[in-house]
Image (tube, grey):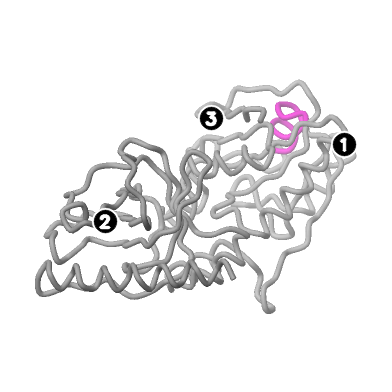
Amino acid sequence: MILMEIIHDTTKFHIGQETAVVIGKFDGIHTGHIRLLSHILKQKEKGRLAVVFTFHPSAAVFFGQASSMELTTRQEKRKLFEKMGVDILIEFPLNKETAATMPEEFIRQILAARMNAAYIAAGEDLTFGYKGMGNKELLIKYAEVCGYEIEIIQKVFYRNREISSTFVREEVEKGDMALVRGLLGRYYSFEGRVREGNRLGRKLGMPTLNLYPPGEKLLPPKGVYYSRVFCDNCMYPGITNIGKKPTVNEDDVVSVETYLYDFDKDMYGKEIVTELLQFKRPEQKFEDVAQLKGQMEKDIAQGREFHEGLKK
């Protein structure tokens, strides 16, 4: 796989080759985004570089109009774009100076001059430039002057509702992982390096893999989920607890802790991806460790049945 180039923390860049460009925040990279991205990826057949232009931080976060909690972290987005085949990702710094860029200047100086845009795929509700005054109509107006093709891409809907990051976020917060998968086109996941926990699972004969999600990662409801883990190109079924483990912990640290069936390898320090397949039950505080162990045994047994059912 060809590595994607990432241009970040600078406004000074120039792309010499013709590009196919899409602009957006891309939180979640849901099926609506995927449709949009498919159009610039198709342009690679014409020898154009597929380029994603996004702001960091996003305009909504910069202007205090939205929470900084994200469906996909910066690192997760980078990996997803690269896996899809994007050639260049531009994480344009958003600050007082760049936020004041007039939309016409953005088209002429950034899209046309610096990015060498030959093709632009735009969503129907795209806004850009000072106070979001730029829109699809302005892009269409400047297309001939600046020498690029413009294609307006229709929205994707689920049951008469537009698929958006807001829609996905609502369902993640409800814990409806099946619907989230449909909206994203993949399971909701957490990734990171396996770290040591309090080793209680190992003492109980149920060793677990611990991830500690970054503070900006949006969490689903605390509780137990049927899940699967990917590591070194292998997939392992399991059951995951997201929460603070109130029976044994008194701190506020949230972990994503996964038990893998019939698994005894040492995974400390390994990079893994944990996907949530289905919510099982909310997080509970048990009277003692013995009661916790009994519930974990039930969860694991039911998890095995769930995963066996997926094979049929």
Nearest the viewer among 295 and 80 is 295
> What is the spatial separation of the Cα atoms under label 1 and label 2, in whole angstroms?
53 Å
Residue 65 in view, yes or no: no
Q: Is residue 270 left or right of residue 76?
A: left
User: Rounded to the nearest whole Å, what is the CA distance between mark 3 and mark 2?
Assistant: 30 Å
Count of labels shown? 3
Residue sitting at 17 percent across and 65 percent down? 246
Query: Which circle marks residue 71 in the picture?
Result: none
For the residues marked 1 and 3, what is the alpha-carbon distance in whole angstroms? 28 Å
Q: Quadrant of the N terminus?
A: top right
Q: Is residue 19 magenta?
A: no
Q: Is residue 62 above or below residue 167?
A: above
- Quadrant location, the C terminus: bottom right
Q: Nearer the viewer, residue 147 or 298?
A: 298
Three-letter amino acid code of the residue under disc 2:
Val
For the residue pair 133 and 222, the one nearer the viewer reads as 222
Left or right, 144 with reference to 155: right
Identify the residue under disc 3.
Answer: 8
Q: Which residue is mark 1?
A: 145
Instruction: Say if residue 278 shows up in the picture.
Output: yes
Residue picked out by circle 2? 254
SS at circle 2: loop
Give residue 142's position: percent from left, percent from top: 83, 42
User: In the rendered image, which quarter is residue 98 located in?
Assistant: top right
Of labels 3 and 2, the one closer to you: 2
Q: Which residues are magenta?
A: 106-116
Q: Label 3, secondary structure: give it.
A: strand
What's under tag 1, amino acid-wise?
A: Val
Mark 1 or mark 3: name the one nearer the start of the chain.
3
Sequence-first disc among 1 and 2: 1
Q: Position of residue 275 (x, y in %)?
A: 47, 56
